[in-house]
Amino acid sequence: HLGNGAHAVLPRHPNYIWEQLGEPRLAACIISDGHHIPPSVVSSIVRAKTPRRTIITCDASGWAGCAPGEYENKLGRVEVLDDGRIVPAGQRTLLAGSGAATDLCVTNAVRFANVSLREAIDMAGAIPARLVGLPEIALRSGSRADLFLYRFDQSAWRMTVLETIVAGECRYRATSAN
């Protein structure tokens, strides 16, 4: 994930972030949750690579969606913070994952990089699928019926997934979906 996990201090020139941004054969994969990289870096990466060469992903951990507090599993103790970051318990700097799912990363890309909602959704689905050679999925005869229905509230920068359909079968439906 470009920019995430980079050294705290890099040489000005050259460094691996510039090299990856400047390499036309590479797409950039970013975690646009607002914690892994700042909004200005999301914007800069998308401008350098373009939306057609940028992939959005999330780093949602097993604690995503949990209330703020400390949790433990076989890997150790973590703390879910009020702002959605998940950190190793006892410190506030290193991340141990994210509480943000892909829907927030998509809406953040719209907000941070000034791309359209369509472009941001494609950055999370169609573009990575194309880059790994998966067939294009479209609403037409003979194509798999993979889609999701959502409601987007731009005033709150929130996307609510109402229903997910995979190969024509409903796999998820929000309890409040009509």
Image: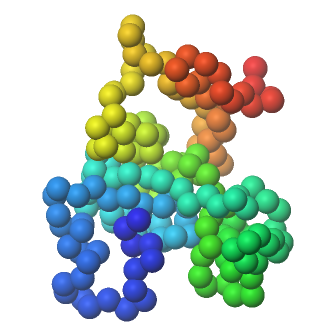
Most extreme residue toward the top is 141
Based on the displayed image, in which of its 4 quarters is residue 120 positioned? top left
Based on the displayed image, in which of its 4 quarters is residue 49 positioned? bottom left
Q: Is residue 167 above or below residue 56?
A: above
Identify the image quadrant of the N terminus: bottom left
Q: How many marks?
A: 0
Mark yes or no: residue 85 visible.
yes
Q: Residue 172, percent across and down? A: 69, 30
Based on the displayed image, in which of its 4 quarters is residue 174 positioned? top right
Q: Residue 29, percent across and down? A: 38, 58
Please name whichever residue, 142 or 151, is drawn nearer the observer in this view of the structure.
Answer: 142
Residue plotted at (43% across, 89% down): 8
Identify the image quadrant of the C terminus: top right
Q: Is residue 74 above or below residue 51?
A: below
Q: Residue 17, percent across and down? A: 29, 75
Most extreme residue toward the front is 74
Q: Is residue 143 above or below residue 92?
A: above
Residue plotted at (81% across, 71% down): 71
Please name whichever residue, 127 or 115, is drawn nearer the observer in this view of the structure.
Answer: 127
Q: Residue 52, percent across and down? A: 28, 45
Residue plotted at (62% across, 64% down): 98
Residue plotted at (72% across, 27% down): 173
Mark yes or no: residue 155 visible.
no
Q: Is residue 62 above or below residue 136?
A: below
Display coloring: rainbow
Is 87 positioned to the left or the right of 42 in the image?
right
